[in-house]
Image (cartoon, coloured by chain):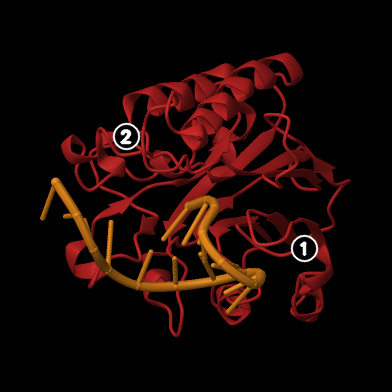
Chain colours: A red, B orange
Amino acid sequence: MRLCTWNINSVRLRLPLLLRLLDEHAPDVVCLQETKTVDDTFPLRELAERGYRFAHIHGMKSYNGVAILSRLELGAREVRHWCGREDCRHIATTLPVGPGIELHNLYIPAGGDVPDPAVNEKFAHKLQFLDEMIRWWPEQRSPDRPMILVGDLNIAPLETDVWSHRQLLDVVSHTPVEVEKLTQVQRTLGWVDAVRRFVPETEKLYTWWSYRSADWAASDRGRRLDHVWVTPPLAPALAGTTVLREARGWEPKPSDHVPVLVDFRF
DNA sequence: ATGGTTGGTAGCCAA
């Protein structure tokens, strides 16, 4: 099974690039974030025509929005709300492969610009979201359950997940407080970072490059914000990963995030 | 130190 996660930054604007991803990389399951559309205007028909007949979507006007598209039959759609808001950041389902897998697709709040929850409500929201997950996973799920967690987590936890650890220590996405909380989430169930199973922690690796750069590839000031985690029972099934760096240059209008692919063998 | 771009939507807000 090939799984993909991608912050597509508007599924309607970038439908041609999504179809290109499907044609060129043939994922069985695709998890999207920032679809930015209500469910009525999600381009389901075009995806079904390409063989992605199963879809669970959870979107709203203008902001956020998550979706799971699949060639494999999906189980029931589950939607979760965090921080008392209904802002379309979490959708889950089950996959009929291997031992039967629960799949969670998440879009964690970006957190605004100022890394101080006292003056920046958006950063406070991000930290609260992480705090709720630190409680929720061990209360509601066992580490024995085969699960995959993917998404735009909006945090680059390792020093090699950013272009300059020193210069990003006070930049939202790499501050110690949020990195520590994400690490705590990871510890709740012993989540395994699938991509770092194949790319050593000494190696720089990014999945996002800002639009505010004259030449993203030349300056290469990226961050690894998009992640695929699995619970311990699935770790032996991990067969390989690809961060599709080339997609940052896809014409005519690339997303600022690139797809992350993970292959499983059962 | 600062500003830089993009998307959705029609105001700026969010990233």
Relative to A81, is A189 above or below? above
Task: State the residue position of label 2.
Answer: A158
User: Residue A73: percent from the left, percent from the top?
Assistant: 84, 57
Labels 2, 1: front one: 1
Answer yes or no: is residue A248 visible: yes
Relative to A53, is A101 above or below? above
Q: Secondary structure at mark 1?
A: loop
Q: Residue furthest right?
A: A76
User: Residue A164: percent from the left, percent from the top?
Assistant: 19, 43
- Label 2 marks which chain's residue? A
A183 sits left or right of A137 in the view: left
Q: Nearer the viewer, residue A25 or A239?
A: A25
Q: Nearer the viewer, residue A211 or A69?
A: A211
> Going 24% across and 45% down the picture, which residue do you hit?
A203
User: Residue A42: percent from the left, percent from the top?
Assistant: 76, 70
Q: Callout 1: few (<14), some (14-19), or many (20+) C-alpha neighbours within 10 Å? A: some
Answer yes or no: is residue A143 visible: no
Relative to A116, is A211 above or below? below
Task: State the residue position of label 1.
Answer: A38
On the image, which quarter does residue A254 sit in?
A: bottom left
Q: Nearer the viewer, residue A112 or A15?
A: A112
Amino acid on which the number 2 mark rests in the picture: Leu
Quick check: marks 2 and 1 in contact, CB under 8 Å? no
